Image (spheres, grey):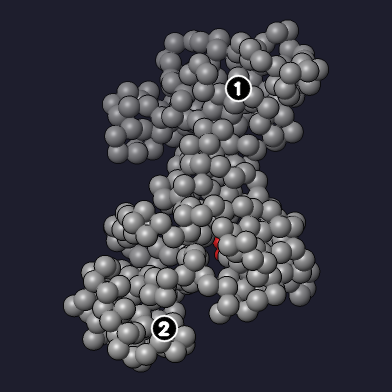
């Protein structure tokens, strides 16, 4: 439905916001653009919408190359972070504004606005102005305006960022249901990985104007393709510990772990041989704690305990490394004692030159 090819955007002054980026988004997909501040998410969304002109590369929507078309002829609706509602217009006029631009007669405009308002529980508010609405209500009006003219795709820039934490969760569930119901291709920008994991069918994790990985939430969470993705995804970042392969074992942070069954680097075996430097990755959720010595565990002093509600995040400080483990509430060791963080079998990943090469 939406594809971009070799998209590059260099802003005046030389900032390369997008760098030969390729992406394919399927019909009906709920697709998240995720990444740290400044990685190019908004620039990519604005380039798809036609609000930015790429330095090179192309944008194709529904099989048509739209790179040279103005925003109004791309048949996509963009919802901005600040909702961009007209303060002097009431809700009906705000929702029906895109129809007015398309010269739809007044009575049909009002009928469509009422229909969309009904769907988004805005009927009672049709006569109010944006200044008389809560943040959540304003967001629904902005969504209603986007839906009103049956676009081929929705583009959302941080649609939930202006809402407080409780409203944000509510609006998230609402957005997910609405997208399921309408089935319209939706691309949304977020820097909140929890939001991307909860909402999207697929996620593109961006890093410095490029796509580091595209995958389902399960794929990017359980098999992050690079150490960058591994450290970005997850409410507690993955433990990433430098180590090396040698004598048929993995030597990581003082622990000796069994070497992986399949040699990292693929079938040839040459890449994964003895002496190779690796990074060993395991999520704190898949790391258990032992208070007795374990050769297959990373030793450290219990340095920090963080309450996660039903669990505790324990940080162990070892010689030259920090390791975190999530333990059930009430099972945390005492601060200052020594413990061993033991990765669960089959849950660890191996990275070489920051790229995933296999399971540990
Ligand atoms: P955030 O999460 O902070 O909104 P983002 O991932 O959406 O970030 P962009 O807004 O796309 O990032 O910006 C990408 C890079 O391009 C940044 O380095 C930014 O400073 C730069 N940039 C964005 N807009 C312009 C502009 N109009 N002129 C010059 N540089 C720009």
Q: Is residue 63 visible?
A: yes
The relative height of residue 66 versus residue 290 in the rendered view (above or below) is: below
Judge left or right: residue 40 versus residue 182.
right
Judge left or right: residue 327 versus residue 295.
left
Q: Are marks 2 and 1 in contact (CB under 8 Å)?
A: no
Q: Position of residue 240 (x, y in %)?
A: 60, 32
Task: For marks 2 and 1, give the one nearer the viewer.
Answer: 2
Q: Name the residue furthest right.
A: 270
The relative height of residue 106 versus residue 192 in the rendered view (above or below) is: below
The residue positioned 25% from the left and 85% from the top of the image is 128
Residue, disc 1: 359
Residue, disc 2: 99
Judge left or right: residue 130 versus residue 42.
left
Q: Residues within 10 Å of mark 2 (few under 14, many from 20)?
A: many
Q: Earlier in the sequence, mark 2 or mark 1?
A: 2
Q: Residues within 10 Å of mark 1 (few under 14, many from 20)?
A: many
């Amino acid at each position: 439905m939406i594809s971009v090819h070799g998209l590059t955007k260099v802003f005046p002054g030389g900032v390369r916001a997008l760098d030969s980026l390729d992406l394919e988004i399927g019909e009906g997909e709920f697709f998240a653009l995720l990444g740290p501040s400044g990685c190019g998410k908004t620039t990519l969304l604005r380039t798809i919408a036609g609000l930015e002109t790429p330095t090179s590369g192309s944008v194709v929507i529904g099989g048509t190359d739209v790179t040279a078309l103005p925003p109004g002829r791309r048949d996509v609706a963009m919802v901005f972070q600040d909702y961009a509602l007209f303060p002097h217009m009431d809700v009906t006029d705000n929702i029906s504004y895109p129809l007015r631009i398309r010269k739809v007669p007044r009575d049909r405009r009002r009928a469509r606005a009422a229909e969309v308002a009904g769907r988004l529980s805005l009927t009672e508010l049709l006569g109010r102005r944006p200044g008389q609405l809560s943040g959540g209500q304003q967001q629904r009006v902005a969504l209603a305006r986007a839906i009103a003219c049956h676009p081929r795709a929705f583009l959302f820039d941080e649609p939930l960022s202006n809402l407080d934490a409780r409203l944000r969760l509510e609006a998230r569930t609402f957005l997910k249901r609405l997208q399921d119901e309408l089935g319209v291709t939706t691309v949304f920008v977020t820097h909140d990985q929890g939001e991307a994991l909860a909402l999207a069918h697929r996620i593109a994790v961006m890093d410095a104007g490029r796509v580091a990985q595209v995958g389902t939430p399960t794929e990017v969470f359980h098999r992050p393709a690079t150490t960058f993705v591994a450290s970005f995804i997850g409410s507690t970042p993955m433990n990433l510990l430098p180590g090396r392969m040698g004598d048929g074992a993995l030597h990581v942070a003082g622990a000796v772990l069994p070497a992986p069954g399949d040699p990292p680097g693929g079938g040839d075996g040459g890449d994964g041989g003895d002496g190779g430097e690796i990074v060993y990755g395991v999520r704190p959720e898949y790391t258990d704690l032992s208070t007795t010595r374990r050769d297959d565990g990373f030793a450290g002093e219990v340095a920090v305990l963080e309450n996660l509600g039903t669990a505790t995040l324990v940080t162990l400080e070892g010689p030259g490394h920090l390791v975190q483990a999530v333990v059930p509430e009430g099972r945390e060791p005492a601060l200052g004692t020594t413990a061993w963080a033991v990765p669960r079998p089959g849950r660890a990943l191996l990275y070489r030159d920051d790229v995933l090469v296999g399971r540990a």
